[in-house]
Image (cartoon, rainbow, N blue to C red):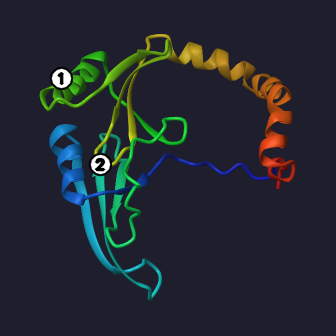
């Protein structure tokens, strides 16, 4: 690569929501995030196309955001189902296992389903939000950095080996052209 450009952090990730108020309740009242912005629009941003929608932002401790679009005019009726975590999920980090347990306690108080998995480098609490988005709350293990450094040292070889094992299946399924570097 010619130029390595420093990418600082995630400013926000954005998803479609079923209802701005329901989403606000869950992210602000249940999870404790700060409602940072709620903007109603009559036009698609940057265009003259008429469309009414709301864009809402919730701020995390580090100043990054999770955002949502409430667009009832164009939302597919069957869109808001629990998404497979392999297809899409958001993982956010908490400081300690006490914080992870506090989130789980808040969820239990409203009878919201959750489960915890110890992944060795992190322990994660998983839920689905009211919009079907899988959220993962992670807490780093004490040896997180060591585990990640060990994995980084072999990451290129792991991808090379994986590609060798799965390339034929992917060519048959997706076509060779779809797998070429552009």
Eyeballing the image, is 42 above or below 21? below
In the orientation shown, which residue stands out farthest toward the bottom?
A: 48
Q: Position of residue 176 (x, y in %)?
A: 87, 48
Q: Which residue is mark 2?
A: 59
Q: Position of residue 82 (x, y in %)?
A: 39, 41
Q: Nearer the viewer, mark 2 or mark 1?
A: 1
Q: Nearer the viewer, residue 172 or 100?
A: 172
In the rendered structure, find residue 105 and report the number of the disc placed on it.
1
Is disc 2 placed on a helix, strand or loop?
strand
Q: Relative to residue 67, is residue 180 drawn left or right?
A: right
For image coordinates 71% across by 48% down, the residue present is 4
Is disc 1 placed on a helix, strand or loop?
helix
Q: Position of residue 99 (x, y in %)?
A: 25, 23
Q: Quadrant of residue 147?
A: top right
Determine the CA span between mark 2 and mark 1: 21 Å
For image coordinates 17% across by 29% down, the residue present is 111
In the orientation shown, which residue stands out farthest toward the front?
A: 78
- Considering the image in quadrants, where does the C terminus appear? bottom right
For image coordinates 49% across by 46% down, the residue present is 9
Q: Quadrant of residue 162?
A: top right
Q: Assess disc 2: are there few (<14), some (14-19) or many (≥20) residues with their C-alpha within 10 Å of its C-alpha.
A: many
In the orientation shown, which residue stands out farthest toward the left?
A: 109
* Figure label count: 2
Q: Assess disc 1: are there few (<14), some (14-19) or many (≥20) residues with their C-alpha within 10 Å of its C-alpha.
A: some
Eyeballing the image, is 1 above or below 71? above
For image coordinates 72% across by 24% down, the residue present is 155
Q: Position of residue 85 (x, y in %)?
A: 48, 35
């Amino acid at each position: 690569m010619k130029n390595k450009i420093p990418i600082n952090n995630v400013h926000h990730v954005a998803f479609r929501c079923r209802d701005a108020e329901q989403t606000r309740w869950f992210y602000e009242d249940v999870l404790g995030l700060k409602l940072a912005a709620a903007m109603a629009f009559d036009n698609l941003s940057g265009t003259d196309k008429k469309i009414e929608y709301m864009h809402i932002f919730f701020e995390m401790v580090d100043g990054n955001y999770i955002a949502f679009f409430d667009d009832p005019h164009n939302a597919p009726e069957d869109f808001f189902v629990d998404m497979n975590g392999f297809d899409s999920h958001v993982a956010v980090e908490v400081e300690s296992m006490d914080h992870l347990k506090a989130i789980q306690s808040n969820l239990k108080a409203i009878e919201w389903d959750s489960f915890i998995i110890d992944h060795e480098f992190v322990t994660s609490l998983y839920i689905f939000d009211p919009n079907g988005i899988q959220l993962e709350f992670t807490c780093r293990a004490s040896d997180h950095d060591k585990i990640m450094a060990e994995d980084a040292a072999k990451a290129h070889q792991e991808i090379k080996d994986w590609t060798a094992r799965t390339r034929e299946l992917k060519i048959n399924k997706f076509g060779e052209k779809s797998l070429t570097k552009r």
